[in-house]
Image (tube, rainbow, N blue to C red):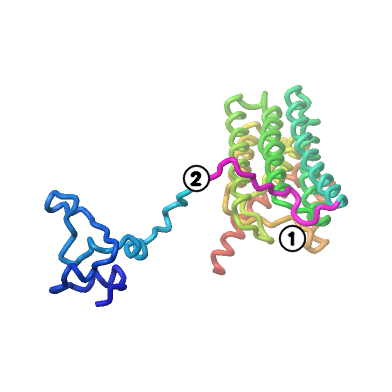
Amino acid sequence: MRRSGTFARQVLLVRVGRRDHDLDGAETLVLPDRRYGTDTAPLDPYGVGRLTAAEIEAVVPVSPAVGPGGPVDAAGPAMAIPLLPGERTMVRRIKFAVVNACTLASLTLGLLAIFQAMHGDVRVAAYCLIACVAFDGLDGALARKMGVASPFGAQMDSLADMCSFGLAAPVVVYASLVGSVSTAAAGVACALVAACAAIRLARFNVSPKDGRFFCGVPTTMAAAVLALAVLIGLPVSGEVQVAGVGLLAFAMVSSFPYAKLARLIKLPPWLWLAPVIGALIDIRLTFAILVVGYLVSGPLLWLRQRRTA
């Protein structure tokens, strides 16, 4: 055997009749032998106890789960993440500020809607919600057109949507339902809208995006429907209104595919004549038919996709 053999080779080969003087001149590592209760007995019969420390360290496996031996510098410089990716020129910063100003305007209008609803001005609060919907669509369109879309803007838009559509819209609806139904029924229905809006927004942030359909009714459209229902004043009982609010809340967290507005705009122009004429005749009935038709379109598209899959 060669003296320069590795630890694995020396363990696998049985030493027969090898004398101790063969390893003279090497710095040996004596390991304790627990069988004989002594700390100096060599670990025979394979001569492992006479291996050098360098030979053992050369073949000792290193676990990837073991962290670095040195202390971690917790006070090191933190990595700064830019809010606006890409070239940071003055023009792009101004565009970035304009887009986020639209988002803040939606947030402010949502707060204003809450304040107006608390003072009993339900119609003014509903108009504020409609303005929230307009600014919410404007900030996304401007961000894409100006080339300043960013993860920061997406997160900020989600937080503003929760305030405007997840909190302000239920408060406005609650103020409109007070007096026609019990306080408990109105509170439960509006709390359901807030909870489903939070779930819908959180799921949208972490889910892959589909350019054709929404997964569930978006919070923006749900808030627009609630605000228009308050402005129009549907001639139905309070119980029916509470049931409609609950149905709209569950539609937000459903998995049914709903067409995006861009696909609806591409419909033939003659199809838009029916709702326009209907609105001139009876705007309340036309609004109810459009809302019910859109809610029913989700389950129908879902069934169609399952049959064709």
Q: Mark 1 points at which residue?
A: 263
Q: Where is residue 123 in the image (x, y as percent from the top left)?
A: 79, 31
Number of marks: 2
Label 2 sits on residue: 71
Judged from the image, the secondary structure of the residue bearing numbered disc 1 is: helix
* Left/right of residue 275 with respect to residue 208 in the rendered view: right
Residue 81 sits above or below residue 9 on the image: above
Q: In this view, does 281 lie above or below 44?
A: above
Instruction: Tell me the quadrant of the picture where the N terminus can be found.
Output: bottom left
Magenta residues, as a range? 72-89
Q: Residue flagged by tag 2: what amino acid is it?
A: Pro
Q: Which of 168 and 181 is in front in this view?
A: 168
At which x and y percent is residue 160? 71, 40
Secondary-structure class at tag 2: loop
* Relative side of 127 to 23, left or right: right
Whole-number angstrom distance, CA of label 1 to CA of label 2 = 57 Å
Amino acid identity at mark 1: Arg
